[in-house]
Image (tube, helix red, strand yellow):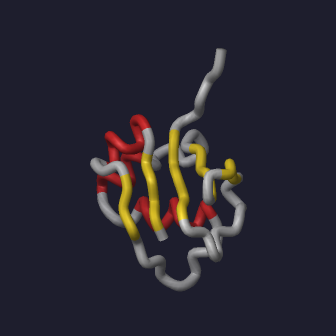
Amino acid sequence: MKLIYFAWVRERVGKAEESVDLPPGIGTVSDLVAWLKGRGEEYAYAFENAGVVRAAIDRVHAKPDAPITGAAEIAFFPPMTGG
């Protein structure tokens, strides 16, 4: 699965994207975030307030309980404002 990080999430993780093989039991966005937080201090820092970070599954905004099974790409980004 391809993971993409934008804005300050990218800065904190230290990379723009990566490909990962998820372990069994990772079925939702929130499961993925919890797993990522355990991968190192940079991930823990990026997702320290997981309720602030937004996600998109295959370029469609997704809630934390959204299933990720079969997804090709998941992106993480901070809240956006428009104007």
Quarter assignment of residue 53: top right
Quarter assignment of residue 66: bottom right
How many circles with numbers are drawn on the protein? 0
Q: Position of residue 20 (x, y in %)?
A: 40, 72
Write the residue at 71% across / 61% down.
Answer: 65
Write the residue at 62% across / 23% down.
Answer: 81
Could you tell whether 36 is left or right of 77 in the image?
left
Q: Position of residue 80 (x, y in %)?
A: 59, 29
In the depicted structure, whether residue 62 falls above or below residue 49:
below
In the depicted structure, whether residue 52 falls above or below residue 23:
above
Q: Nearer the viewer, residue 20 or 64?
A: 20
In the current view of this chain or complex, which residue is farthest to the bottom?
A: 24
Could you tell whether 42 is left or right of 74 in the image?
left
Q: Where is residue 52 in the image (x, y as percent from the top left)?
A: 57, 39
Write the residue at 37% across / 44% down.
Answer: 10
In the current view of this chain or complex, which residue is farthest to the top?
A: 83
Write the residue at 65% across / 14% down.
Answer: 83
Q: Which of 45 and 76 is in front in this view?
A: 76
Q: Position of residue 6 (x, y in %)?
A: 44, 42
